Amino acid sequence: MAATPHPDLTDIGACVFDAYGTLFDVAAAAARCNDALGDKAGPLAEIWRTKQLQYTWLRTLMEEYQDFWHVTGHALDYAMESLSIKDDALRARLMDLYLRLDAYPEVKGMLEALSGAGVTTAVLTNGSTTMVTAAVRSAGIYPLLDHRISVDRLEIYKPDRRVYQMAVDDTGVEAGRICFMSSNAWDVCGAANFGFKAVWVNRFGQPAEKLPGAPVAELKSLEPLPALLGIG
């Protein structure tokens, strides 16, 4: 059934997207190394992503910022060690692939629909400026994003409220008129608690987090988003 306009999303001034897990498949790097990883590809991807997120939160609490590229490398080192993988060439290959993660198949068409309708678009990411620039260029969506906003500017990670404020400042749109999309439930909670109209892209059917802030809508992919906004 086709999506219909959502009553809470009728006056949106900008659409802001999380990057990793939302626009880009974070498991793609490990999947492309199936030849070397075999049945360890899935576990490596899961451990890598879990530690990557944990390290952002813990470094924020410790006030010991390192950019997301270094955090990603440390998380990969942990994942490889936990699976008894010792292969420097494979590590380098995985890190290189992380700069060129696959975008989910609906992303480009969805962004084209928003851009064609004159909607301001942005990515708001924990990723470093270098990482997000490489990713959006590789996916062919660079010109479809009006703003590419990295936490590098603040040297602090989501879900700190100051990160979400950057989207308000850069787009010039007040929080209540920003539609924010993330596949990470904790990020959705943080964005909603800040004041965004948050939409949870629940790609894997996960349960909701028990945290302050709730999404106004839940999707399985980004494909229905333009219709939710009354576009097309």
Image (cartoon, helix red, strand yellow):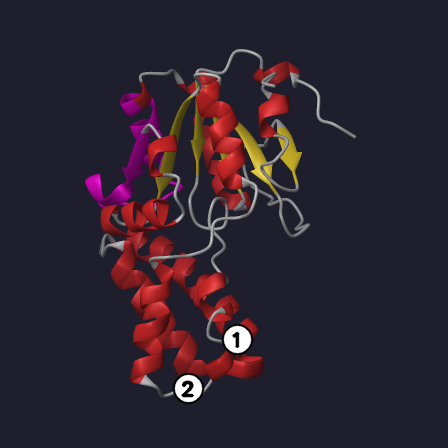
Percent position (x, y) of residue 49? Answer: 46, 62
- The residue under the point 52% across, 67% down is 46
Q: Which residue is drawn at 58% across and 81% down?
A: 39
- Residue at label 1? 41
Within 10 Å of disc 1 (Cα), the crowding (few <14, some 14-19, many 20+) is some
Residue 168 is covered by the magenta coloring: yes
Determine whether, in the image, residue 104 is placed left or right of residue 160: right
Residue depicted at 38% across the width and 36% down the height: 123
Height in image: 183 above or below 143?
A: below
Q: Is residue 195 visible in the rendered structure shown here?
A: no
Q: Return the mark for residue 144.
A: none
Q: Nearer the viewer, mark 2 or mark 1?
A: 1
**Figure quadrant of residue 202:** top right
Which residue occupies the extreme right position in the image? 1
Give the residue at x 24% y 54%: 67
| Percent position of residue 14, x then y | 43, 21
| Mark 2 to mark 1 CA distance (whole Å) | 11 Å
Residue 35 shows up from this direction: yes
User: Which segment did they paint magenta?
Assistant: 147-170
Q: Looking at the rendering, which quadrant does residue 148 occupy?
A: top left
Q: Is label 1 in a helix, a strand or a loop?
A: helix
Which comes before the other along the chain, label 2 or label 1?
1
**Residue 140, quarter of picture:** top left
Image quarter where the N terminus lies is top right
Residue 18: x %, y % from top left:
43, 40
Looking at numbered disc 2 in the image, what kind of residue is underneath it? Ile
Report whether 72 appears left or right of 207: left
Label 2 belongs to which residue?
85
